Amino acid sequence: MKLKNFPNKAFFISAMIFFCFVSVNAFGKVDEHIKKTFSVKPGGLLTIETDLGAIEVNTSEDDTVKLEIIFSHKRGSRERFNEILTNFNADFQQSGDDVTVIVEDKNKRSNFWNSVGKYLKVRILVTVPEKYNLDLQTAGGSISVADIEGNVRTSTSGGSLTFGRVKGQVLGRTSGGSITLAGCEGNADLETSGGGIRIEKVTGDITAHTSGGSIDVSEVVGSITATTSGGSVRARISQQPKNKCVLSTSGGSITAYLSKDVKVNIDAGTSGGHVVTDFPVTAIMKGDLNNRSLKGTINGGGPELYLHTSGGSIHIRKDT
């Protein structure tokens, strides 16, 4: 229709603006927010269990736990979104300085991801005191935690894990995603079924495992066990370990950086590369003619440093 043939141009323009406004509201993104605030003291515990959604934790100097749950429409009709949202329940409980949050689909559908997950997006935004403990679980979504003083436990069935500097113990589990830890003053236990692991300085012991990715540890002051089924392993051992250290991979290279005065017994072997070391080694057992294995002591010996790969070279470097 040409505008010049319409009997009332002003009415036509107004009608079109109204139609566009209604269309955006009828078919655009729909959000629902829930906000809660709890007065607590530092040192408490926040527990979150959710059937769906990413969790993001920040800290503040306030003695409060602040939570915001955002339900967002991903696709489908508004009616479908409202139906799904009606069947979701968010439960909040406080016991002393501890807060528990449970977000669940009341229908407990067996085909949850097809019937709910593809239509609904959930984000849980949290602010806790700078000194607080966390136990976070989601059936689908990433988890991120800012710098915090306290023990941190996390688990997701599908998403990345990101941690700032943690003054406490860290445990992280994901069935599919990368893991990053900026620092830890305590033990760190991290595992993913599909993704790389990157760790900065840890002053305790490290356990890191991935079924498909590389592992990179910038500095460990303690013992380390780092294993991967498909990627390289790189670690810096800056102080004398008290227990056995293990770096192994089924498909990549291994590089171990050792402080010049670290005392270890070396057990290194590769099926598809060479073993190279910057340190003088007192051999217990000489390697084969292709330099694919090495057993001996560095600086007089100490706990075992086990380095094995099926598909790459092994480098033992002097950390300068």
Image (cartoon, grey):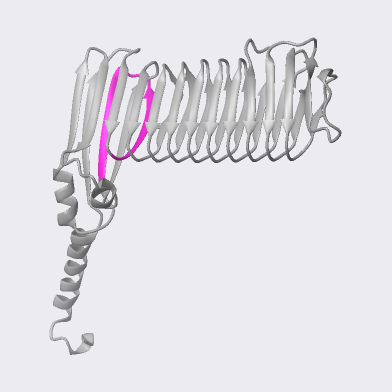
Answer whether residue 92 is visible to the viewer in this image: yes
User: Would you place residue 179 above or below residue 98 in this image?
Assistant: below
Q: Quadrant of residue 196?
A: top right
Q: Quadrant of residue 223?
A: top right
Towards the viewer: 76 or 128: 76
Q: Residue at x 33, y 30 (%)?
A: 137
Answer whether residue 146 is visible to the viewer in this image: no
User: Would you place residue 39 above or below residue 158 in this image?
Assistant: above
User: Would you place residue 132 above or below residue 123 in this image?
Assistant: above
Towards the viewer: 208 or 92: 208
Q: Residue at x 38, y 35 (%)?
A: 156
Q: Residue at x 51, y 21 (%)?
A: 188
Q: Position of residue 76 (x, y in %)?
A: 23, 58
Q: Is residue 232 left or right of residue 131?
A: right
Q: Residue at x 15, y 72 (%)?
A: 15
Q: Position of residue 106 (x, y in %)?
A: 16, 38
Towards the viewer: 312 or 30: 312
Q: Position of residue 26 (x, y in %)?
A: 18, 60
Magenta-tinted stretch: 52-71
